[in-house]
Image (cartoon, rainbow, N blue to C red):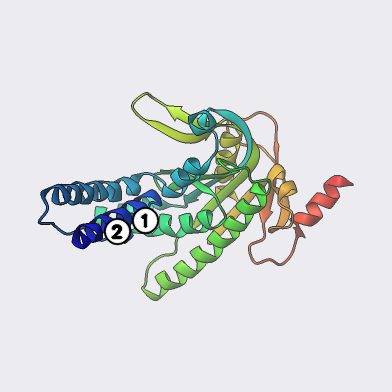
Amino acid sequence: GRRISTQVARLAEAADRVRTFEFREIAELPDSRLRELARANSAFNAMVAGLRWFETYVPKALVLRLMHRRGGLTSFQSEEREVTVMFTDIRGFSRMAEHMGAADTAALLNEHFTLLANCIEAEGGTVDKFIGDAIMAFWGAPEEQPDHAARALRAAHAITRAVREGNRRRAAEGLPPIRVRIGLHSGPVVVGNIGSVSRINYTIVGDTVNVAARIEELASALQGDEEVIVLSSAATAFQGDGAAPLDCVGDRTLRGRTGTTEVWRVTLDGDGGDGAGAVREEEKA
């Protein structure tokens, strides 16, 4: 009886780790002389192996947040929400990849995406998708985050420091630097489960997403030799609550859009320019 209870307890403990998505921490369950337990352990081991692959393709942090939301399936209905959207891109990546093999290209992107995703998720952001050498991320969903703009600005600052540190390591190895562009914009989006019957993504759509992407594109004309450039719309700047110092770039025309958009640039070294808090006081006045 004690031998059976020990094996059942081991199985229960492993199942509890599955509940919290700690797939990498689950040791393989041993075989058993009892046929029923042997079959259960074998099936459990196969399930965990599949889940380890599954978490590679599905953002675990997002799934956990959705699981913890109240309201069951009804809470996943599409809704309008105020969010901040971030787009990042590697400048000149296509030319860089021309001189690299497939394995080296994949290794570079994996390292880069891991670096940026850690900064985004540390501020409670959701990495929506990887698009070639670009990242789309957002704050403000699925949880309510009233400080979504400040979180995004802090994440952009963290990315800047991480990229610069990574470039120092690359320089020591005789490799060219990675130059990154970042665009931020805050506004309303439609957020929820969007897709086909066979495949659904929890994502955001709307004009706010398009503006963020266009601001990131605009950064290519202003980056110069900077390792990282962060551009923000006025909407994000005014809601940033001093999360990052900002300089006004002025009204700019974004590709594919009529009229102009007021754009601000994050002063990455923290010196010069008015801070986001000063921006807000000016706007109030």
Residue 263 seen = yes
Kindly identify the residue that appears in the image at 47 percent across and 35 percent down.
202
Q: Residue farthest to the bottom? A: 172
When the figure is inspected, residue 154 is found, relative to residue 85, above or below; the finding is below
Percent x, y of residue 112: 41, 58
Question: Residue 54, labelled with which disc?
Answer: none
Q: Residue farthest to the right? A: 285
Percent x, y of residue 88: 51, 49
Kindly identify the residue that appears in the image at 72 percent across and 55 percent down.
247
**In screen coordinates, is 128 left or right of 48?**
right
Asked whether disc 2 touches disc 1, contact meaning CB atoms under 8 Å apart, the reply is yes
Q: Within the image, what quadrant is residue 251 found in?
A: top right
Q: Mark 2 — residue?
A: 26
**In screen coordinates, is 227 left or right of 110?**
right
Q: Quadrant of the N terminus?
A: bottom left
When the figure is inspected, residue 181 is found, relative to residue 177, above or below; the finding is above
Percent x, y of residue 66: 49, 41
**In screen coordinates, is 285 left or right of 244?**
right
Badge 1 density bin: few <14, some 14–19, many ≥20, Cα 10 Å: some
Question: Toward the viewer: 139 or 51?
Answer: 51
Kindly identify the residue that appears in the image at 59 percent across and 29 percent down.
79
**What amino acid type is highlighted by mark number 2?**
Ile
Kindly identify the residue that appears in the image at 46 percent across and 52 percent down.
90
What's the distance in space between the residues labelled 2 and 1, CA to CA?
Answer: 7 Å
Percent x, y of residue 55: 34, 48
Question: Toward the viewer: 139 or 285?
Answer: 139
Question: Residue 22, labelled with which disc?
Answer: 1
**What amino acid type is highlighted by mark number 1?**
Glu
